[in-house]
Amino acid sequence: MATNAIDQTRRMLSLVTYLRERPGARVEDVARAFGITEDELIADLDVLPMCGTSFRGGDLMDIDTDGDRIWWHNPDDVAEPLRLAADEATALLVAARAVATLPGLREGDRQALLRATAKLEAAAGEAAGASSRLSVTFESEGGVFADVDRAIAERRRLWLRYYSPARDELTEREVDPIRLFAVGHTYMEAWCRLSEARRTFRLDRVAEIKLLDAPADPPPVELRDLSEGLVQPAAEDPEVAVEVGPGGRWVAEYYPHDSAEELPDGGLRITLRTPDPASLRRLALRLGGDGRIVSPPALAASARQAARQALTAYGE
């Protein structure tokens, strides 16, 4: 079952109470109790040690697991009453006010946040005055995130204008969102009605987004394990060979590949697999004189043609 960011936050808050009352709880029992997989639980446990009662990291949750049981070593320390320094209260108030302005935030959550902010202002005293003179404006991705998060929560379809770097074009499509996740950038996994397949969309490439009244109804899909990264080539994907000079060796560090053979000039011959070989034309253009696609022949010819067109455009 897909969850959104707010649902995950609620779950993690409940998880703190659950673990405090059950020292040494078994991973499988906790995952079953919260209706999530053990991998999802471990991902939550990776985040909790970065949370606590001090922005300076003095009272963070000391939680770890051996893969079988979960241990929380300092529950009493974290449970002590919270006392914020002036700069901590200011930062928290500024962040709370900024989040409350996010478009697409559910009204119930917005009101709860505003009530908590009012209580914090009363407790902060003079520090609250300083925070009122500061403001934060989110970039457009924040609004896209809020709309996607709301669509997932309300099970609604989305309309997108999306930039595809592989084709260098904007496309319009309707999608049924499945989940949000972050791997370097923030992504939405969704069922695309244009291609009738599961697709991944990077939020900062969404040019325009609208919530539709139509209900989202993605077919049942098994969520991919992203622990090995976003790009996970399959054995049946087409094979591509790229030769790079010394200045292009970085390709082997950033692209999952089957092999990287040393070349006499200090470069590499890199063999990789991708479900969309055409997307590597942009890589060839980026490499310029530091690399070239050598196979398959049709892709190599296409990359050379794209390079000639680019040079012609510069000449004009």
Image (cartoon, rainbow, N blue to C red):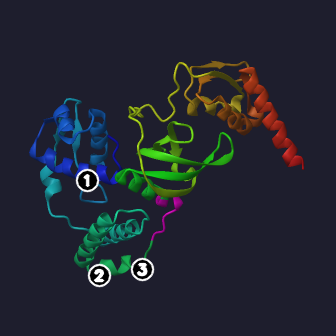
Q: Is the residue marked by circle 2 packed among few (<14), some (14-19), or many (20+) residues within 10 Å?
A: few
Q: Is mark 2 on a helix, strand or loop?
A: helix
Type of amino acid under label 2 = Glu
Type of amino acid under label 3 = Arg
Q: What element carries label 1?
A: helix
Q: Is mark 3 on a helix, strand or loop?
A: loop
Residue at 29% over, 70% down: 111
Residue 222, position as x, y percentages in the image? 38, 31
Type of amino acid under label 1 = Arg
* Mark number, residue 133: 3
Instruction: Name which of mark 2 and mark 3 comes first in the sequence.
Output: 2
Q: Distance between the residues labelled 1 and 3?
A: 30 Å
Residue highlighted by disc 2: 126
Residue highlighted by disc 1: 10
| Residue range (magenta) | 136-143
Asked if residue 181 can be seen in this view, the reply is: no
Q: How far apart are marks 1 and 2 (CA)?
A: 31 Å
